[in-house]
Image (cartoon, rainbow, N blue to C red):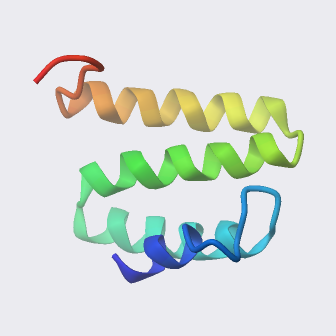
Amino acid sequence: MLLNNLGSSPTSGATSRAPNGFWRSALALQREIGQRAWQATTVGNLAMVARGHHDLPGAEALYREALTLHRELGNRPGRR
């Protein structure tokens, strides 16, 4: 998704405010159309931004949400 890619551009690092806006917009669209795989990735990206801003409770909540989505999708690290 374009908004997700804009948030990942080299000019918008994890400590910048720019990716947060792009990723939140992307997440809203992904939820609207039911694109759960992209939701998991985007929520993980938002967690990185929260961590970069030293919002550790927010980052933890987002990482847990991303992990839940990945698990529901059957994504397991190190397994194919």
Tell which residue pokes out farthest to the left in this image: 80
58 lies above or below 1: above
**Residue found 75% across the figure and 38% down from its top:** 58
Residue 54 lies in what quarter of the image? top right
**Residue found 58% across the figure and 76% down from its top:** 22
Tell me: 37 left or right of 14. left
Residue 59 is situated, as x and y percent measured from the top left of the image, at: 71, 36
Tell me: 63 left or right of 21. left
Q: Nearer the viewer, residue 27 or 53?
A: 53
Tell which residue pokes out farthest to the right in this image: 54
7 lies above or below 77: below
Residue 44 is situated, as x and y percent measured from the top left of the image, at: 52, 44
33 lies above or below 77: below
Q: Nearer the viewer, residue 80 or 20?
A: 80
Residue 31 lies in what quarter of the image? bottom left
**Residue found 10% across the figure and 24% down from its top:** 80
Residue 12 is situated, as x and y percent measured from the top left of the image, at: 70, 72
79 lies above or below 11: above
Q: Nearer the viewer, residue 62 or 4?
A: 4
Image quarter (top left, top right, bottom left or bottom right) of the N terminus: bottom left
Tell which residue pokes out farthest to the front in this image: 10
**Residue found 45% across the figure and 36% down from its top:** 66
Total tally of numbered discs in the picture:
0
Residue 26 is situated, as x and y percent measured from the top left of the image, at: 46, 72
Tell me: 4 left or right of 34. right
